[in-house]
Image: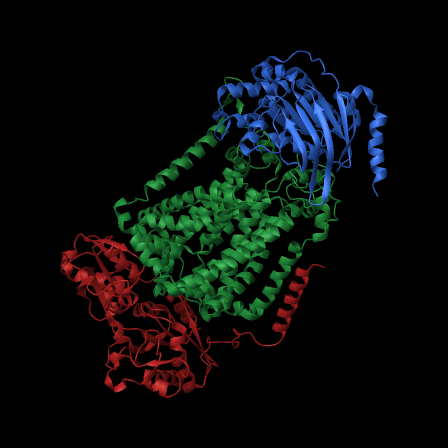
Chain colours: A green, B blue, C red
């Protein structure tokens, strides 16, 4: 399969005027490369090696987890009885719930916004195209990896000591952990861009910052907005963390409802969350259409109408909408910042408090249990990713218009995925525990569902961002839809497919706390336990372990990107 | 080496006076471009050796030669993207191979570069892409058309008019045809009031009629504003039609440097033929 | 062929081989629970309570006792969520479990379970009971419970009996509404409630007594004299051990006997924890001083004493008093 893929990647090249050539393998030589004898393109180790490695881990994982599909069917009655207890959903007093939702939303918006601002700079410095000092680049990459590896729980207990109980500590905990994901994905977007506009603007004598804003950031805008809105979605869902900083909100209410077995209220809260996520998804869709990266069939080709003077763009409906959306996003962010309520008086003793807490982390303690926990989590995360990626790919292919152009299907699928995402891991875990009893199998299934949701979201986004120009060229040759997909879409999609699969594992590793809910161990359980029992030296050991694994995954991903892009 | 006389142009375009006036007056004393014993190697591979070339202001030089001969590398050396291994480059009296980052940026504002790949940001309008040409002389980054000073915006419209795209000024660049996109890129270099325009196979991905129109635009603008053009080309016929002077590169060396009127299509084709024969 | 291909292929082959021979460490008999016939194995689930540590390790001797008495292989599952264990019990897939008293109160409505024992911290009966303490920074002008009116009050979370419910009941008893007469702040955990009270985020904190007396001083988070205790709740029953009623009568008796038969010291003598022994704790008295003992449950108990549903009635009373949201069941 990959063999044909590479050939066709080469085939599509000469046709399209304006084709971006971004993902072709042996295309343009980078500046500085010798124009040596062209090598015959060969299947790179990454395109074959990584899927094979996943397969190997999965085979091991299936044996290790002791996956027995028949058991799920046997437990169907128990699942039904549990689901019965969730209907009809109740919300309690609705205005209260709405107030909680808004409170959560403000903190999430503030945290995501702060993370985005920090990430733009960090990602620019961490990207391969950064031309400044090496040290800055390493530092930026280090910050991105560490903030990603360290769960928001840890940031929460640190910031609560510094800033006190309240939304500020919560917003910052969310912001710090978000930097890891937003910064990484942004850097990936920057790296994937074709170099020619950047070179062109460098050649007019623009400085680094000007060049970055005009070419890199401008081109990344569509991908970055959908990424930021998706992170906002994650942060709303992960808002149970706010309970640890006394900030309350809808996530805490959901956690309490589930903890007190009040499943009908939990279902009501989940429905409210799903509605919020659907709104965010719609916003993402509209923004995506307004700022599309590639000119697709329904992209507006006139960006502005003529204004009063020849040199002035006029105001038409779409420009008004674009500007209004940008201004209101900014206002929303500023308003959300005002909700964080910084108390400067607290900062006086902050450093003593933080230092007292942090000194408890040294020296880190490593135990056999930590190694075992990491091993369990890695196996589970990879195995769940394998199945999640397969399912996610199917969902993504069906919900984009490359193969099937049946709008209701893709809309339904998108809604289903949002719904899937809206239900917290713990609910899946409970459902599978009812069916299968405690143990890794139930945890694996719950984790697989969250991997499916993650993967289908990532894949849908990158399938939509595929450059349509080569596809039109292929269609013009009379190729069928499947042929166009295999020869035109897939080769463009492979790098992000591999990158996002690895990233799904990376995120799944952090989500493996769900394994603790079903008694399947894992590093998340140990982390929670060490924090709850104030055993911070052990927490430090776990964090170091997590960082090592994330760095390893990141290195594989970077190597793969170099080979595939 | 013969240095042809500067072609008489049809008088500078009104816009040209704004900034190239100084360049034009200095032109008679100082060559735009001087390359001395220039050589560059990447690792053990020698890409260019012993290149000597002097270009007078206002000349249109066509750079021909087979793929891999070193044409792009030569242009990148002039632009300061590569640093030479041996010899010196002097562009408008500045050596881009040794000057610092700031002076290089400053030099680059005076040197336009037209790429085969256009180097446009596809999701922005033609106008915004053209305005980016002024970034070198502005201090801060800009976002959106209206953040550029009105004067520059008017200049951008005027330059789009000169390349015949004023009606498409608010159109998304990736919905323009290839020839139109390349003309937007040329308008972008016009914003720089460049004294030299380097073009790296500007028409290689265009159809014959678009190629002709792009090159004629470049030629006309060069004549109007008096800027020097060094343009690498594969199409021998086009090179003969637009250039004043033809320079041929093969296997890293200059093998021909002559007035366009002194050479013929057959002679130039022979360079490609020999190249084919020379290769195993 | 790339080198990495070979490595990967070798890895794949190795994992296949491994899979072909040998059972998974997580493999289990085809049916656990789900039927009232005599089961072939047992599942023992534990949930961390406020003061538990090394959860799985500390229950191993108890499980060893159960295995010895019943002759059935028993697996321990350490679970981070009470809901997880309760739902597994509702589906009759967990046979024995320990969790907080409040979780038992919730579980009895959905799962067919009975308490058989509760932990005992010293040889004295009823010593497993815990208290909720109201603490203030040393020297604060809040001296008794009535003084908290109108103050910022840190609790743990709304579903914690020591960190909220008992205190709320206490407030109601003296005529204060825990929602409106004070400003409640839920800090998420006992230690954060105390540290943030000391940092000035709230005036008083209600937390499990063991955090004030043992855990936080041991971790150096608070020192002697940092906090004043202004209120102590009535005893809240300790950690119950509950058993599924779907198990055959004689098996239930065997399990109960196994749990009650030993204490930490006799268990060590009976060889239930050959590898993981520690010295007897001071509060256990002179009788046991210097003897080796097992870790006997997550709370480091001395032994378990028999318990019945009645022993947990006080939770129901707290719930009836407070009418708390978390107490309401569908």
Which quarter shows the N terminus of chain C? bottom right
Residue B208 vs C10, above or below: the answer is above
Most distant residue in the bottom direction? C270
Give how far across and how far down residue A164 sits, in percent. Answer: 29, 51
Q: Can residue A479 be seen? A: no
- Out of C305 and A176, give the one closest to the viewer: A176
Residue A310 vs A53, above or below: the answer is above
In the picture provided, is A84 more to the left or to the right than A74?
left
Residue C248 vs B64, above or below: the answer is below
- Out of A10 and B189, give the one closest to the viewer: B189
Residue B192 image-quadrant placement = top right
Residue A96 vs C86, above or below: the answer is above
Give how far across and how far down residue A291 sits, in percent. Answer: 53, 35
Q: Which residue is drawn at 64% across and 49% down?
A: A564
In the picture provided, is A550 more to the left or to the right than C95?
right
In the picture provided, is B251 more to the left or to the right than A287?
right
Q: Which residue is drawn at 30% across and 44% down?
A: A341
Looking at the rendered structure, the number of numbered marks drawn on it comes to 0
Give how far across and how far down residue B157 sits, in percent. Answer: 57, 19
Give how far across and how far down residue C201 sits, in percent. Answer: 25, 52
Q: Residue at x 69, y 26 (%)?
A: B230
- Out of A382 and A186, give the one closest to the viewer: A186
Residue A481 image-quadrant placement = top right
- Out of A154 and A109, give the one closest to the viewer: A154
Most distant residue in the top direction? B11
Which quarter shows the C terminus of chain C? bottom left
Q: Can residue B173 be seen? A: yes
In the picture provided, is C12 more to the left or to the right than A525?
right
């Amino acid at each position: 399969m990959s063999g044909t893929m590479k050939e066709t990647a080469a085939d599509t090249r000469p046709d399209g005027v304006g084709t971006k050539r971004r993902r072709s393998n042996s295309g343009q030589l980078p500046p500085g490369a010798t124009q040596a004898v062209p090598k015959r393109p060969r299947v790179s180790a990454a395109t074959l090696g990584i899927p094979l490695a996943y397969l190997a881990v999965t085979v091991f994982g299936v044996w290790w987890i002791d996956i027995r599909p028949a058991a799920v069917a046997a437990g169907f009655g128990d699942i039904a009885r549990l689901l019965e207890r969730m209907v009809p959903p109740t919300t309690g007093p609705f205005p209260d719930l709405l107030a909680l939702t808004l409170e959560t939303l403000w903190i999430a918006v503030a945290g995501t916004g702060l993370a985005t601002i920090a990430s733009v700079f960090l990602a620019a410095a961490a990207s391969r195209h950064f031309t400044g000092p090496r040290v800055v680049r390493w530092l930026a990459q280090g910050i991105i990896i560490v903030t990603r590896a360290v769960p928001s729980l840890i940031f929460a207990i640190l910031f609560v000591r510094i800033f006190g109980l309240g939304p500020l500590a919560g917003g910052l905990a969310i912001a710090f952990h978000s930097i890891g994901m937003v910064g990484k994905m942004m850097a990936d977007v920057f790296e994937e861009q074709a170099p020619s506009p950047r070179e062109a603007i460098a050649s007019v004598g623009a400085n680094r910052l000007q060049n970055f804003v005009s070419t890199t950031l401008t081109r990344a805008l569509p991908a970055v907005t959908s990424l930021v809105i998706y992170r906002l979605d994650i942060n709303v869902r992960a808002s149970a963390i706010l309970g640890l900083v006394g900030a309350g909100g809808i996530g805490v209410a959901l956690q309490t409802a589930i903890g007190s077995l009040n499943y009908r209220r939990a279902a009501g809260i989940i429905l409210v969350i799903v509605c919020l996520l659907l709104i965010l998804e719609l916003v993402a869709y509209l923004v995506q259409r307004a700022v599309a990266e590639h000119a697709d069939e329904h992209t507006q080709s006139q960006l502005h109408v003529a204004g009063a003077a020849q040199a002035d763009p006029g105001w038409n409906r779409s420009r008004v909408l674009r500007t209004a959306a940008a201004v209101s996003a900014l206002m929303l962010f500023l308003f959300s910042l005002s909700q964080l309520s910084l108390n400067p008086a607290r900062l006086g003793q902050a450093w003593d408090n933080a230092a007292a807490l942090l000194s408890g982390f040294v020296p880190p303690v490593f135990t056999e249990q930590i190694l075992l926990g990491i091993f369990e989590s890695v196996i589970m995360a990879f195995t769940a990713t394998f199945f999640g990626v397969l399912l996610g790919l199917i969902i993504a292919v069906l919900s984009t218009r490359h193969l099937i152009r049946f709008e209701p299907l893709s809309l339904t699928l998108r809604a289903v995925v949002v719904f899937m995402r809206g239900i917290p891991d713990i609910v899946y875990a409970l459902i599978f525990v009812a069916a299968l009893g405690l143990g890794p199998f139930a945890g694996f299934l719950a984790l697989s569902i969250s991997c499916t949701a993650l993967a289908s979201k990532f894949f849908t986004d990158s399938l939509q961002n595929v450059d349509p120009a080569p596809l039109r060229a292929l269609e013009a040759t009379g190729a069928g839809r499947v042929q166009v997909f295999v020869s035109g879409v897939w080769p463009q999609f492979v790098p992000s497919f591999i990158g996002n699969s690895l990233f799904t594992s990376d995120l799944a590793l952090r989500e493996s706390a769900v394994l603790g809910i079903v008694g399947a161990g894992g590093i998340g359980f140990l982390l929670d336990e060490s924090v709850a029992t104030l055993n911070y030296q052990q927490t430090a050991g776990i964090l170091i372990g997590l960082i090592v694994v994330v760095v390893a995954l990141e290195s594989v991903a970077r190597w793969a990107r170099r080979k595939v892009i | 080496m013969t240095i042809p006389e500067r072609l008489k142009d049809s008088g500078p375009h009104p816009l040209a006076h704004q900034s190239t006036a100084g360049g034009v007056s200095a032109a008679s004393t100082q060559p735009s471009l001087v390359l001395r014993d220039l050589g560059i190697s990447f690792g053990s591979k020698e890409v260019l050796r012993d290149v000597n070339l002097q270009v007078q202001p206002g000349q249109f030089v066509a750079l021909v030669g087979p793929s891999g001969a070193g044409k792009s590398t030569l242009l990148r050396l002039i632009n300061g993207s590569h640093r030479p291994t041996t010899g010196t480059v002097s562009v408008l009296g500045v050596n881009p191979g040794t000057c610092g980052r700031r002076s290089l940026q400053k030099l680059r504002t005076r040197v336009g570069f037209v790429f085969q790949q256009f180097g446009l940001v596809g999701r922005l309008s033609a106008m915004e892409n053209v305005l980016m040409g002024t970034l070198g002389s502005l201090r801060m980054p800009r976002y959106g058309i209206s953040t550029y000073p009105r004067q520059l915006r008017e200049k951008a419209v005027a330059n789009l008019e000169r390349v015949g795209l004023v009606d498409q000024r608010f159109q998304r660049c990736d919905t323009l045809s290839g020839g139109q996109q390349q003309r937007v890129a040329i308008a972008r270099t016009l914003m720089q009031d460049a004294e030299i325009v380097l073009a790296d196979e500007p028409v290689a991905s265009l159809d014959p009629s678009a190629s002709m129109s792009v090159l004629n635009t470049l030629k006309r603008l060069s004549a109007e504003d008096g800027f020097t053009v060094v343009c690498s080309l594969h199409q021998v016929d086009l090179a003969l039609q637009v250039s004043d002077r033809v320079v041929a590169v093969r296997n890293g060396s200059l093998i021909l440097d002559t007035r366009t009127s002194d050479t013929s299509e057959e002679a130039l084709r022979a360079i490609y033929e020999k190249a084919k024969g020379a290769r195993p | 062929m790339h080198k990495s291909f070979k490595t990967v292929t070798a890895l794949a082959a190795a994992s296949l081989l491994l899979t072909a021979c040998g059972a998974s460490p997580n493999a289990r008999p085809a049916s656990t629970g789900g039927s009232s016939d005599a089961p072939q194995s047992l599942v023992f689930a534990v949930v961390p309570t406020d003061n538990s540590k090394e959860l799985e390790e500390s229950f191993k001797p108890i499980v060893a006792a159960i295995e010895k008495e019943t002759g059935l292989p028993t697996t321990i599952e350490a679970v981070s969520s009470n809901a997880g264990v309760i739902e597994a019990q509702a589906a009759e897939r967990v046979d024995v479990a320990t969790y907080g008293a409040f979780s038992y109160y919730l579980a009895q409505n959905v799962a067919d379970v009975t308490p058989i024992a509760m932990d005992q911290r010293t040889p004295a009966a009823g010593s497993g009971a815990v208290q909720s303490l109201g603490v203030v920074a040393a020297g604060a002008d809040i001296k008794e419970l009535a003084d908290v009116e109108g103050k910022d009050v840190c609790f743990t979370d709304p579903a914690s009996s020591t960190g909220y419910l008992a205190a709320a009941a206490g407030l109601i008893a003296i005529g204060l509404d825990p929602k409106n007469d004070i400003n409640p702040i839920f800090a998420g955990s006992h230690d954060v409630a105390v540290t943030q009270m000391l940092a000035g985020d709230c005036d008083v904190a209600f937390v499990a007594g063991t955090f004030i007396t043992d855990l936080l001083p041991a971790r150096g988070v608070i020192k002697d004299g940092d906090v004043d205790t202004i209120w102590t709740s009535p005893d809240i029953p300790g950690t119950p051990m509950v058993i599924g009623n779907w198990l055959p009568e004689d098996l239930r008796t065997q399990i109960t006997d196994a749990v009650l038969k030993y204490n930490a010291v006799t268990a060590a003598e009976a060889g239930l924890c050959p590898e993981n022994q520690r010295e007897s704790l001071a509060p256990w008295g002179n009788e046991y001083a210097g003897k080796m003992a097992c870790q006997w449950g997550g709370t480091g108990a001395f032994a378990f004493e028999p318990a019945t549903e009645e022993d947990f009635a006080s939770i129901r009373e707290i719930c009836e008093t407070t009418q708390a949201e978390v107490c309401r069941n569908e």
